[in-house]
Image (cartoon, rainbow, N blue to C red):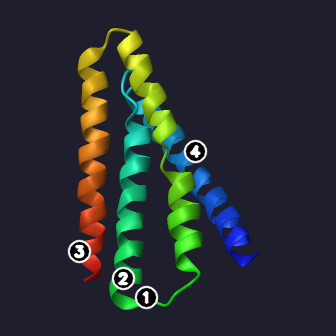
Amino acid sequence: MKNYLLIFIGGGAGSLLRFFISSWFNPLMAVFPLGTIIANVLSSFLLGLTVGFLQFKYPGNTYLQPLIITGICGGFSTFSTFSNETLILFKAENYTFGILNILLNVILCLIFIALGMKLVK
């Protein structure tokens, strides 16, 4: 039961973080979903830090995985919004930004997960 509560609390916090970041950054570039990329990259970095911490520093912790990895990072990152925004770019025949959105989300998120894990070692 404690895991459900930790996921619930973390998911709500992550969703609010994503909402605030998207609300702040998306208006800066009307044609490109900057807020979603920033939210996904920050969430990936936090996930990398947490995975690294659990793997290298505190492997017995039973609270951080459901709270941060499943809850906060699950609510903070958003594959569905990224997919929808990419589809909107393609439908508007803005193929360059659509492809750029895919590449930046995938490549930057992988880099920042690895960076987060490396910082903990």
* Residue 43 in the image: above or below residue 55: above
Report the front residue among 41 and 48. Answer: 48
**Closer mark to the observer between disc 3 and disc 4:** 3
- Residue visible at 54% across and 39% down? 23
Lower position in the chain sequence, tag 3 or tag 4? 4
**Disc marking residue 55:** 2
- Please name the amino acid that badge 4 sits on: Phe
Residue of label 1: 59
Residue 7, position as x, y percentages in the image: 65, 65
SS under mark 3: helix
Quadrant the N terminus occupies: bottom right
Report the front residue among 55 and 84. Answer: 55
SS under mark 4: helix
Please indicate whether residue 17 sits to the left or right of residue 55 in the image: right
**Closer mark to the observer between disc 2 and disc 4:** 2
* Residue 91 in the image: above or below residue 18: above
Residue of label 3: 118
* Residue 111 in the image: above or below residue 87: below
User: On the image, which quarter does residue 26 sit in?
Assistant: top left
Residue of label 4: 19
Mark 2 Cα within 10 Å, few/some/many (few <14, many 20+)? Answer: some
- Residue visible at 73% across and 70% down? 5
Q: Measure how far apart labels 3 and 4 are at the Cα level.
A: 28 Å
User: On the image, which quarter does residue 31 sit in?
Assistant: top left
- Please name the amino acid that badge 3 sits on: Lys
